[in-house]
Amino acid sequence: MMSEVNNTTPASDDEKMFTDFDRIVRGKIFGGRICAIMQFVNPKNFERNRESYNIVVHAIRSLMSKYEGSYYTLHDYSIVLFARLSERFFEQSFEKMVLEIDDVLTRNNVAIGLTPEEAENAVRWYRFDHNLDELQEWMDAMAQRFRVYSERRKRLLAKAGTGAGATDGVPITPGALQQIEDILKKADVTTFMRRQPISVVFGNQPPKPIFQEIYVGVNELRQAIAPNVNLRGSRALFQYLTRTLDSRVFRSLLDGFVTRNSGPFSINLNVSTVLSDQFRDFDSRIGNIVKKEQIIVELQRWDVFWDYAEYLLACEFLQNNGYRILIDGITPDLLGLFGRKELRADFIKLFYFKDHHDDWVAKDIQQKIVDADPNRVIMARCETDEALRAGQAAGIRLFQGWHIDNLIRAAKEVIS
């Protein structure tokens, strides 16, 4: 139920890869063993578009389930595979694997920012029984780069710890998570629940709210129950915590936080929550309080592609039962990849970031908005008049953010 903060560093497996490589080398059983190294031309693109990287990783993970091997996502967004193929049918198996990896990259070349030709050349293959020296040289060079990266990261974290970042608290741990969950299971989270309108804005006319987003205020919740813990310090643990919050928000909604006169509203949920027994119970009861057509379920973009098959199941259940779907956290440069119609979403929410203002004046942004339907695209984090004007110029009609809230308050003051 809380807004997630993007983690711009890949889930680094560097140390595990080096350990596994050393173990294989010490074992000296090289027959059939191969290594594939995928390195991308513009890996920094993934710092803003992590889901593009996850699309490829998910495809690789599915592929590797067919082979005896493992894969590693490195600090620089490289992907490394170790596999062991049949020695008896090595050539056939190797050729098949090469074609399958090439297919993954060429099918997703737009997502990873490569031309088809670059995608074909993004992989280097090594056989342990033929190219071990070359592979060892690459591993040594990567280990050195990882050491430099790790030291730089430690310095930045240390610097942050003496400045503004000091108030972030210690990263959440499994033990702290258990304690927080125990508190939440008994707590009434209604105190921390907030509303923010999504509004239609035409020209200089006052915004007209069309629905409210209901969400949990993370900072207020943290200050109340765990002021010394950085709830977002671990993405996996944070997501687990949001599932617990989902159930507490269900309770608040069922206990009177909304009524039939509340009008349309959205709530943030995890895909796994939608597919849970808790949501089935909520679904069976909420219709007695509000019409399900009033409820819009917001799903985070990273959650959509974490398990796309699960997302499609969640879509089918929600839409068959009258709910509407909103995909949250898209950015303009991703709009071509996250098609609203293809994702079966009723709305998509585009985030505005001041330091990426150029994305909103790109020559193709208006056509992207038209393709997605201007009546179903929301500019979120609209905190300034500059953002509002950029969104309107791009063809957007729906807005959410502090600036919109201020315009609504100002219009009410004029009327009163």
Image (tube, rainbow, N blue to C red):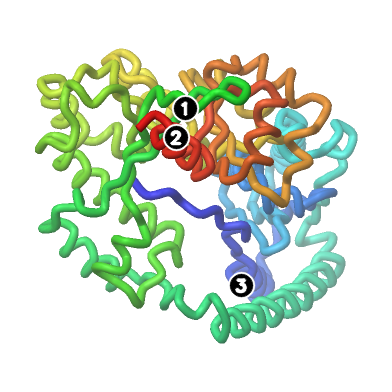
- The location of residue 312, given as percent across then percent down, is 43, 24
Q: Of helix, strand and loop, which one carries label 3?
A: helix
Q: Is residue 66 visible?
A: no
The percent position of residue 45, horizontal first and vertical second, equals 75, 48
Between 174 and 232, the one lying in front of the other is: 232
Q: Residue at x 69, y 72 (%)?
A: 25
Residue on which the image places disc 3? 15
Rendered-image quadrant of the C terminus: top left
Q: Which is nearer the N-term, disc 2 or disc 1? A: 1
Q: Rounded to the nearest whole Å, what is the CA distance between mark 2 and mark 1?
A: 9 Å
The amino acid at mark 1 is: Ser
Q: Secondary structure at mark 1?
A: strand
Residues under numbered marks 1 and 3 in contact, where contact means CB atoms less than 8 Å apart: no
Residue position marked by numbered label 2 in the rendering: 408
| Residue 324 as seen in the image, left or right of residue 349 | left
Mark 3 → mark 2, Cα distance in angstroms = 52 Å
Q: Is residue 128 left or right of residue 331?
A: right
Q: In what quadrant of the picture does the N terminus appear?
A: top left
Amino acid type shown at disc 3:
Glu
The residue labelled by disc 1 is 199
Quick check: can you spot residue 409? Answer: yes
Q: CB under 8 Å between callouts 2 and 1?
A: yes
The disc at residue 327 is: none
Count of marks placed on residues: 3
Give the amino acid at mark 2: Ile
Q: Earlier in the sequence, mark 1 or mark 3?
A: 3
Label 1 CA crowd tier, 10 Å (few <14, some 14–19, many 20+): many
- The local secondary structure at tag 2 comes to helix
